[in-house]
Image (cartoon, grey):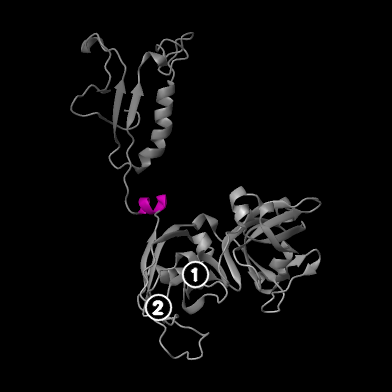
Amino acid sequence: VDPQAMHLSEKVELFVASGDLTYTNTFCVLYMKRGPQKEFENIGQTEAIGGNQNPTRWTKRFYLDYFFEEEQILKFDVYTEQNYGKKTGQLKDHKLVGTATCALGEILSEAGSVVQRKLMVKGYPIKNRKTKRMAHVIAFAAKCQSVEETRNISLAFAANKLIQADKTTLSDPYFLITRNNTVVYGDRTQHIKNTIFPKWPTFQIDTQHLCNNDANADLTIEIWDWDKDDKSGDDFLGSVTLTLNDLKQRPQGITITNDRKKNKKRGFGTFDVRTYKSASTFMDYLQGGVDMSLMVAIDFTASNKHPSDASSLHCIQDPQSGQPRISAYQHGVRVIGNIVSIYDADQMYPVWAFGLNVPSKGANALHAFNLNFDESNAEVHGIHG
């Protein structure tokens, strides 16, 4: 049996959300215990999200190695931020809202790879005082796809003629990008005040984080109206659903829809992708016709010792046998040059030197000169030139 086949492991990404919390400014700390381990290991924590959002969907995701043959227990501790805790930076100085646990394998084996677990305090579930429903965490996991294809991209969005959510002022819109109903980018603090024509600033995100490198995965851009009053919650203004392939086309005037409003036929505005830029890879440059050239400068100062010394970087003859040998400088230039030379069209390389006494050039050491002693052209042909 192939040993690799017996060790079933996958890289997965984990999203966390919570619902029916009484508290605001909450964050989640993730722990994991593998197999016979007695103690949970701290994997990391999400950002804190303010406002009365239900569910609270954190943008932080966790990347985990899933092992089929091991029991991997996850523990989710949800806290509400305390000012003293922010000062000390100590987790114990924040207020613990509740704890939930489940196995990583449970999440992956559930339909849609989503599980919901009640938040517990001292063994008892906690209830939202307003909704009367049980507070809970939601965990969603997905296999990481084609990590080597990850690109960094820049995006910028705008919207036009959004609905006016407030009676006395215009909306204060912000957006959230969601995938599988989990937030992958966005923050209510990034709202733009008093406008129905927002133009949000450019932001950067990698495609692994955005869409798990699936160019056809649905991405929903939700638009919300920020509300200063945490008790009332933010107002949903509408959404559009696009894919990474759609974003690349920088579409304009996409109709915003809002299924949460009773009058669904009214206009909710339009959405524009103002900017889409993808960071180029080395392969992109090569396919675009990039030409590379190696430039060499060689140190002939006394620190590299006399060429007759076996330890000199310039030694080209074995002091004992008298046989010729390749110096350390020659070896370095050839190793690097052989790699770079395949990307150079004319195979011409400038070579300079410094710190060398040349009797025909005077008594003093030359501090910068063309090593071929051609004052008009420092280039030589080929790596062995």
Instruction: Report the side of 110 relative to 84 (left or right).
Output: right
Q: Earlier in the sequence, mark 1 or mark 2?
A: 2
In front: 383, or 15? 15
Please identify the dominant SS of the magenta region.
Answer: helix
- Magenta run includes residue 18: no
Say if the magenta span includes residue 286: yes
Q: Determine the CA span between mark 1 and mark 2.
A: 22 Å
Residue 316 visible in rendering: no
Identity of the residue drawn at 39% across and 69% down: 157
What numbered label is drawn on residue 176? 1
- What's under tag 1, amino acid-wise? Leu
Disc 2 marks a residue whose amino acid type is Thr
- Residue at numbered disc 2: 169
Quarter occupied by the N terminus: bottom right
Element type at marker 1? Answer: strand
Give the magenta range: 281-287
Q: Are marks 1 and 2 in contact (CB under 8 Å)?
A: no
In percent of width and height, residue 7 lies at 72, 54
The answer to whether 349 appears left or right of 168 in the picture is left
